[in-house]
Image: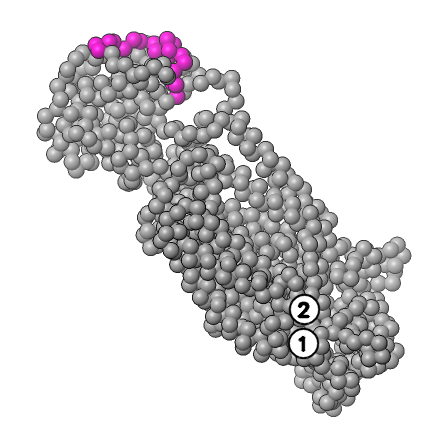
Amino acid sequence: MSARYGMVIDLDRCTGCGACMMACAAENNVPPLPQASARTGLTPLLVRKVSNGLEGSDRREVFIPILCMHCEYDTPCVHVCPQQAVEVDKATGIVMQMPQRCLGCRYCMTACPYHARYFNWWDPAWPKGMEKSLNPGVATRMRGVVEKCNLCHARLHAAKEKAAAAGKREIDPADYVPACVEACPARAIRFGNLADPKDPVAQESQSQDAFRLLAKLGTEPKIYYKSKEPWVQAMAEPNSGPIVEAKHV
Amino acid sequence: MFPGVDGFHWTAGHIIFLCLFFAVVLTIALTVISAMRRTIGDFRSHRAIDLCWHADFADLPATDRRCRHELAGRVISRICPNAFDCRNCDKYSEFAVLPAKGMTHDLGLNYSSDRFYHRAHTWVKPEEDGTVTIGLDEFADHLIGRPDSVKLPGIGSEIDLNQSAWQMKKNGKEISVRAPIEGTVIAVGGPKENWYLKLRPRMDVRDPKTLRHLLRGPEVYGWLSRELERLQLQLGAPDAAPTLADGGMLMPNLMDTVPRADWNTVLADTFLEV
Amino acid sequence: MSSTVLTDSRWIARGAERTSFSRFLAWLAPWSAMLTLGVYAAFLCLYRGLNQTNMDNRFAFGLWIFLDLGIIALGAGAFFTGFLVYILKRAELRPILNTAVVVGFICYSGAVAILMIDVGQPLRAWFTFWHPNTHSMLTEVTFCISCYLLVLCLEYIPILLRNRQLRRLPSFLVFEHQLHNLVPVLAGIGTFLSFFHQGSLGGLYGVLRGRPFAFRHGFFIWPSTFFLFILSAIATGPSFLMLVTATVEKVTGKQLVPQDVFRRLGFISGILLGIYVAAKSIDTLIWLNFTSPAEGFAPWTYYIHKPFGTPVLFAEIVLFGLIPAFLLLYRKTAAHRGWLFSAAALACIGVLMNRFVLTVQTLALPTLPFDDFLTYTPSWQEVASFGGVIAYGVIVYSLSYRYLSLFPQPKGEDAHVPRS
């Protein structure tokens, strides 16, 4: 029974605190990169601040965490990678990036409409002493390769090992929780198996308030966003509603 | 991913793509290998030198490629299409029976009727025992004078028609003399003797076709007078008008007496080098 | 000739007029300096990483990819001339064949050199061959361009081996003869490979479902950009050859090819360019009215960002497409040298513009509703390394012109001495 892991992110709850970004960086051994700019930084999970374009008392703002959408249909990055350094894991639906095989051609980065892929423009380096805080379960990446969110696959591995040690075939869902989901103080990011109709996240993803970004492109992303605000829901379509500006956190 | 790695399965796309790719690579490889094998075959069958000669011939200027029958006055104008290979020329028998132009004045150069002349200025003299003697003709001899050094082939070595038979050095210029006939070297001479090589020819000299490609009789006169005209233009002062000396004789030792001439061009035209 | 002056006349074909050795070295000097700077810039990118460029996560492809696509399109003259001469037996284009091979060789070797610097891990380039993704256009491009570069080297070798000194080795000359006999096979392979990789370079962008500006439907697995790129490449390749040859004629002060060759190349270029403009116009209309709106992107929103407004679209198709096609085909302008070469130049600019629009403008445009329209300026390392490729091209061409027979002159009355 294969799973389809996905998320529902409640934008009405997200406070923009950035704890998810920090947890992601810590879990995935993302180097600090003090020399990077907003456009060359490495943020597998990036919280973006979006407004409705109005000023004064009509102005509304929302924070949107952007990560790999783990597209299901004709996944753009999988389709274009010349040496199959990324593939869709059929058992979990996770789009797996293999930095060891990545050539660094960056074709996948042009293919991804969500800009969820990041290139290692520099050699990773940590200040002296910080290497002790690295997560031993996640390999670091070298300069010149592309990386992205892989739904904390190391934690899935750990959950599987724990289940195997206990003699079980299926993992306990409570054991596999990505770092961002675990860190969010508002519990705005909710993670679950979209293939399981009994999963509350799967049910939530089908609710009326849930939408996906750029759904019309037909890539079938598995990260859903949820908001009761109509102007936020309008962001599902690129051209409906006024063009909203964005500022990075 | 890759055959043998789990999760991989053949699709039509894989098969078509890999078939096309390997077909292309195979064709390219076969082309190169075929060219190499044919090259080796050419060397084994003595065709290699002939091919080199044809390639060089194609790059000679038109004035150096005139048909012998034009030089002999049998035809008005003809550029040789066969790299001087009269043995296999289909027009030879047609042109050879036409009357040749007679001698109009003494050129001052020795050429005898028992010798056969090659366009790169060597002569071939068939001997009674079936061998041939090869020497440098007087035109070339007067040009070079005494060479500074001569490099002759070893006894027993095989030489192909138009291959570089022996090399000479004079005043820092390298001269490569083309072989007028193919055969095995049985003796070597030098500038002190009046011959350079004795060969046992690969073909039978009693067969008239063997020496067909060489000039003889009145043809030599026509050829040499053209050569002298060319030489006069090339050795004359660069800004002087061309003069046509009447009855003058070619002086010996020209490379020493006219050192400022464009010897690279003169020698290349004389010895048919590219 | 005095032997005290340093001279390379031994290497120059007899009868060929070439400038003096010292003047030639003076000509090479500035290009060598440019090449050295380019090599240094490339070294910096390889040693310190791609942070030496101004590319970023939003502009993952930059100047290099645009220029790579551009020079591969312009280098299409090599395979197309080979196709016309050897497969379609158009012998009147033979005089331009040798120079076409050298231009092609320069374009493709330069493009591959830049690609090796552009990727993050060049030593992993063989991974594409070991783990090919048959769905990816880039795999197809990699395979085809590698094989085609090999074919171009094999076509260049006979020209090289006929050098005055190299040909003195009998094995070289005989091998050259045998390889030359098989050149039609290589020309056929080259045509096949070029058809696919020119097309796949267009396919790179046409399959991008996530970039509605570039995404196109097409025939089977090939988006329309596949066919449009092939058409634009074979239309402008001959024009580029014309420009290169005319430039060489001007620099050397000699007439190198029969003038008839220019007229024919212009005609071929014009016809193909006309077909391309028609196809591109139809494709653009389909994209504007059906493909893009179906993905949720109203097409005119692409053109609200200055300076990439609709004048860019107009310029690409009309100014640098329709107009040069007309000039190349209309008898009065095609007969006039000035108009002919201006039209060729416009056509080449048009193809460069097309590649620019698809590489740079695609990435500049936003996809997510809250994205900005971005700009990017190449760093000096990017510009210098590409300048190095241009310098490399000029140097290789200059050496080839000087020491090899790039423009075989008809010899006396018998212009085509038959080879055995």
Please name whichever residue, A230 or A226, is drawn nearer the observer in this view of the structure: A230
- Residue occupied by mark 1: A238
Q: Could you tell me which residue is drawn at 76 percent across and 54 percent down?
A: A123
- In which quarter of the view is residue A90 placed? bottom right
The answer to whether one can see residue C154 in this image is no
C54 above or below B200? below
In the image, A223: left or right of B203? right
Same chain for the residues under marks 2 and 1 in the image: no
Q: Where is residue C232 in the image (x, y as percent from the top left)?
A: 47, 59
Q: Could you tell me which residue is drawn at 68 percent across and 47 percent down?
A: C381
| Chain to which the residue tagged by mark 2 belongs | C
Q: Could you tell me which residue is drawn at 78 percent across and 59 percent down?
A: A37
| Chain to which the residue tagged by mark 1 belongs | A
Would residue B248 be counted in the magenta stretch?
yes
Q: Mark on residue C366?
A: 2
Task: Considering the whole magenta stretch, tell me its main secondary structure.
Answer: loop
Where disc 2 sits, the SS reads loop
Q: Are marks 2 and 1 in contact (CB under 8 Å)?
A: yes
In the image, C341: left or right of A141? left
Where disc 1 sits, the SS reads loop
Furthest toward the bottom, the residue is A198
Magenta span = B246-264
Q: How far apart are marks 2 and 1 (CA)?
A: 9 Å
Q: Where is residue B251 in the image (x, y as percent from the top left)?
A: 29, 8
Say which amino acid is labelled 1: Pro
- In which quarter of the view is residue B73 placed? top left
Q: Where is residue C339 in the image (x, y as percent from the top left)?
A: 43, 49
Q: In which quarter of the image is the C terminus of chain A?
A: bottom right
- In which quarter of the view is residue C367 placed? bottom right
Q: In which quarter of the image is the N terminus of chain A?
A: bottom right
Please name whichever residue, B106 or B181, is drawn nearer the observer in this view of the structure: B106
Disc 1 crowd, CA 10 A, few/some/many (<14, 14-19, 20+): many
